[in-house]
Amino acid sequence: MLTDRYELTMLAAFVRDGRADHPAVFETFARRLPEGRRYGVVAGLGRLLPLLADVRFDADEVAWLLDAGVVDEPTADYLRSFRFTGDVDAYPEGDLYFPGSPVLTVRGTLAESVVLETLVLSVLNHDSAVASAAARMSTAAAGRPLVEMGSRRTHEGAAIASARAAYLAGFASTSNLAAGLRHGVPTTGTAAHAFVLAHASEAAAFASQVASQGVGTTLLVDTYDTEQGIRTAVEVAGPGLGAIRIDSGDLADTAAMARRVLDSLGARDTRIVATSDLDEYVITALADAPIDGYGVGTRLVTGSGHPTASMVYKLVAVGDRPGGPLRPVAKRSHDKISVGGAKRAYRAYEDGVVVREWYRVGDGPDPEPDAVPVQVPVVRAGRVVHEPSLEDVREHCRAAVASLPEPVRVVSGGAPYLTVTEGRWDR
Amino acid sequence: MLTDRYELTMLAAFVRDGRADHPAVFETFARRLPEGRRYGVVAGLGRLLPLLADVRFDADEVAWLLDAGVVDEPTADYLRSFRFTGDVDAYPEGDLYFPGSPVLTVRGTLAESVVLETLVLSVLNHDSAVASAAARMSTAAAGRPLVEMGSRRTHEGAAIASARAAYLAGFASTSNLAAGLRHGVPTTGTAAHAFVLAHASEAAAFASQVASQGVGTTLLVDTYDTEQGIRTAVEVAGPGLGAIRIDSGDLADTAAMARRVLDSLGARDTRIVATSDLDEYVITALADAPIDGYGVGTRLVTGSGHPTASMVYKLVAVGDRPGGPLRPVAKRSHDKISVGGAKRAYRAYEDGVVVREWYRVGDGPDPEPDAVPVQVPVVRAGRVVHEPSLEDVREHCRAAVASLPEPVRVVSGGAPYLTVTEGRWDR
């Protein structure tokens, strides 16, 4: 039921007019990247595929759909036995995408494919927006660990998906426990100001935390006076204290002061973690500050100004009888023209750097010798056939971002590095 | 498990240091509104309260928490029997809030209250961001119906919550079927370009849709040539056609053309629905266009530039023994100072217009005679005692927005209409 009413009313019309079982190809792509972004990161596939393979309409849902007038009895019958039986090819999760990249291709009957639109786009648009922001933050952090801690700034379900997307795009860990349990994302955490306030003194709070978590813990030192908080922290935990967290004030100035104070107290290995409205720009600006790790919340889960990717799901080919040949279709709406026909995407590399991405429509001569296919089979006959571990996805993303030229990876804005169009065989 | 690791490590320290059962009061409030916003709409309470009353940790979760080193055995024991047994007071869902408004107050033990932080904020921050944007769009639409259709642009779970938040803040309906099934939000829909492309001709597609949905349906007319699409629509459906949808081009110009063509064909009652990147600003700019209804997607589910409210959850009072008296606490972090003590909020009205909102901390003389309490009891001893219907919430929101002065309701930006501080008895 994670779908739009019009998917099912279109389905009802297809059932009625006899086209439900005609073959169809739908493609997901973005016409553009968010303003200033030079590349995007595809994310969500590992969440989407199990959901897609499990789409069902149970008796209560079908009864509700009939009662709400969404579908008629023949369509209700169709939904009662619905399962997706088609094929899906996709860009591997963690890979790059650019305007025009055919990131996901669904082949099935018209009826079973049209129903998937909303679910496909919800998952890919959300997770890709977060991963695309996370990849830029990871680049900005230049090896210093990033902790995802934005759960409280987004929907409780989106929070879990955001933690997963951030991790695959280079974050070291998340605060979100459900993401740890469900997806195996490493979880970390510090303490809140409430913890300090709940005790009779800052020293008592620190002592309690160290007793419970050990001296390797991270103490939050800015509830009252930050410099005094640091001194109290080292007094309580000793110079072996794991880390302190700073969550307010001018982070660069405060971190510099903190480093001086920690060093003067012999706590030379105590790390400094900064939080408070960080994003890739602030992290870049803090590059010279003695900060050892960052916690990123709001700006991560909201895609750093771009909370959704603008992927669409478009019919590109359809047949006029069950099992019949496909004909390419494309709309010609003003400013929203699409390109008909199923597309196969390729990239070319020079010295490990991606220099071109293009697609071919339909059959033709063999691809150019330097053409590396991008898409992989992910669903066959309704069964998921592509299940990389999240660690594999994370490594794939790291390698994909590393294949971009260095000036494209950095945070400063610009046009998309590549635009993907029909290439090179027919030109 | 929809919570942050640090909530449970703080809990572990409280269990260890003996403070777990000490009484505490936490408050949720926003220090500021998003740039340019003059008021916010509180939303999410109807989703939050059942979640909050149902917080449990099952055996598998506790085993995972132990295994991951998040909690120790005494804390695992505490979690196995966890249930929230405290009290909650809140601003009614759909009500207004301003900087400083104490929108939700949790009273319970330190342990049971600290665990709720992430869940409370996830739900309220997401839903309030969407409802606050929706209220502005509703004002801009000036009585013309708005359809929420942003499911594909947000996480699949957030999509359902967004549909609910939009409806309570004045939208007429949603495309999201799960929101219809789960929350009773009216669902509506049209058709996608894929539906037109899947048929041999636009006329064949329209005929199929009308055969399935009746002439009252909404035909999407811009797949090829919009003017020709309108002519074909009326030819197929007759002048009794319910509506057409325009999703591309200059919407004002296209709507004007569409109205002329429809009228010339005798389809004077056929409505014109516009979609395509609408928000409160575009809707305001289209006020003079002959558009009868709007579909809003991306900008609604992303809070029209502000995808999260910035509410926080802060400890404001704590006791030093079980059942003991509460002492106010407040942090003094730079730029993030909070005000200690549990707060009761009041408003004053003049001629039905809200003119002041203030709070009182602790006990004191009776409130001023014109003081109208804002908070209501919503949970008592862990049981939900406030369950208005979504229709009631929608009516409450309508009345609340109507209580703002007209210049505050309109879309043009400005400072928050009110800032809520400690008032009036002690000044």
Image (cartoon, coloured by chain):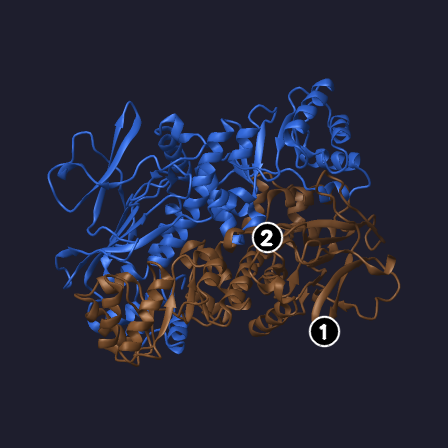
Chain colours: A brown, B blue
Q: Is residue B413 visible?
A: yes
Q: Residues within 10 Å of mark 2 (few under 14, many from 20)?
A: few
Q: Is residue A211 visible?
A: no
Q: Mark 1 belongs to which amino acid? A: Asp
> Residue A130 got which mark?
none
Q: Chain of mark 2?
A: A
Q: Which residue is mark 1?
A: A351
Residue A189, horizontal then vertical, whole percent? 37, 69
On screen, residue B179 versus residue A191, left or right, reads: right
A242 or A102, which lies in front? A242
Upstream in the sequence, badge 2 or badge 1?
Answer: 2
Q: Mark 2 belongs to which amino acid? A: Gly
On screen, residue B101 versus residue B412, left or right, reads: left
Point out the image quarter for the C terminus of chain B: top left
| SS of the residue under disc 2 | loop
Q: Which residue is mark 2?
A: A36
How far apart marks 2 and 1 lie (CA) works out to: 26 Å
On screen, residue B255 versus residue A108, left or right, reads: left
Q: Which residue is at a point 50% across and 48% down the rendered structure image?
A: B160
